[in-house]
Structures are given as structure tokens and as C-alpha cells.
Image (spheres, helix red, strand yellow):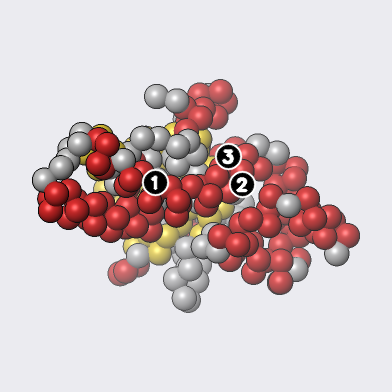
Amino acid sequence: MQPEHYCGGIRAYYKNVEGMHSRNFIELHFLKELLPGYFWIFPLPNGYANVGAGMLTKSISMKKVNLKEAMLSAINNNPTIKHRFKSATLEGRIDGWGLPLGSRKRKISADNVLLCGDAASMIDPFSGEGISNAMYCGMRAAEKATEALSANNFSADSLRTYDDIVYNRLLTELKLSHTLQKLCNYPSLFNFVVNKANKNETFRETISCMFDDLDMRAKFKQPSFYFKLLFG
């Protein structure tokens, strides 16, 4: 395993977390002790919330972070979070996984094999989101499997075009997200961007759109973006 291309993630279910948005927006809290990574609160039906934390595996090892302890510390001690859990109860146990990130291009087909989703390491390196990429892989894999059945040919050479199709659509996006992930290694710069967003509604919307807008993400690789941020 290459720890720079994996993320450690833990998740728990809590009931009665206070302060949820009326429109059930998800929350990502970029805490210094979890960079590159974040603490999350995802609203669920019937008063429940998916609460967890994720961090790059390489950083977990280098910084000797206990991810479970870091998550519980945020819940119990962080001044912007702890008051929301004063009446919350943990439902069930805290579970954890190792998550393969799409920060490195991998071979995703072989003889009789087409890999999708997590098996293909298609998790976004910055947001940690993987469902949309998994669905795209699934659609393309189904098409390729149909072709293979019709031709009765399941060889690696025949299936290799699946790799090309998937990466032609997703590789640029995954590379951009990997670049954004690296930004989290510079907390002062990251804090500057977040503080700027907090004071500027237009910029705040830009940051929010970045999570699902490929063109918006591309701006984060342009020096002119930061020049405008500094002096605009």
C-alpha cells in the first residue's frame, strides 16, 4: 500500500446533533489537527447524523494521529462544535476503513476483470466523495461487459479500452482534486482562503461550487486566481 494515496476514515451515527441547517446541508470542518482531511457532519432522517473524520494515511502515520481520538476531541472540545453535541447520543459503534484515493492512475481492468468504485480507487482525493465516480465506472463497465459478452472475448487486451474511457472522463478531475489536497499541507494559506470566503459571499459561493464544478476547480491551479484573491 502507498500511504500517500490512501485515506483513513472513521464514521459514527449520532442522534440529536443541534444546529443542523434547515435545508440539510452537509458540513465539512477543516480542523488544523486533521489536515489534510476534515471532520464532517452529514444530516440524516429522523434526527440522526453521520459524523466522522478522514485524513491522508501518510499524514496519520507521520503525525501519529489517532483518528478516533481526534474525532472525539473535536466533538468534546472544539469551541465551534462541542455545544452542538451537548444533548447528542452515539448510536452504535465507531467504524473505520482505509479508503483508496484516485490520486494515482491505476490499471482497472485485466483478464475477466473490470474494477469500479473503491476497487478502482476512484475516491476524490480532496472531498472524499466517491459515489458519482463509482456510478460512472459502473455504467461504463456495464457497457464494456455487454460488448465482451457479444464478442465472447474477456481478455485484458479487449477490456483495456475501459481504462481509457474512464480516465478520459475522470483523470483531469482527480488530478485537480489531488492538487487541492496538497493545499491543505499549508494551513496558513488554507486559513487565508477560508477566512476570505467567510467575508466575501461571492468567493464563498465559488468555494462551495468547487466541490462539484470541474471548471471551478481548475481555477485553483491558476496563479491569477490567488492574485485576484489577494488584491481583488
Q: Amino acid at mark 3?
A: Pro
Secondary structure beneath label 1: helix
Q: Amino acid at mark 1?
A: Asp
Secondary structure beneath label 2: helix
Determine if residue 105 is in view.
yes
Which residue appears at 85% of the width and 64% of the height? 232
Label 2, on which residue?
180
Label 3, on which residue?
36
Res 101 quadrant in image: top left
Q: Is 212 in front, or is 8?
A: 212
Q: Amino acid at mark 2?
A: Leu
- Percent position (x, y) of residue 114? 25, 43
Which residue appears at 80% of the width and 55% of the height? 224
Mark positioned earlier in the residue sequence (3 or 1)? 3
Report how far apart the C-alphas of labels 2 and 3 lie in the structure: 10 Å
Report how far apart the C-alphas of labels 3 and 1 lie in the structure: 30 Å
Q: Which of pointers 1 and 2 indicates the residue nearer the eye?
A: 1
Position of 28 with respect to 133 (left or right) is right
Which residue appears at 48% of the width and 47% of the height? 171
- Percent position (x, y) of residue 53? 46, 44
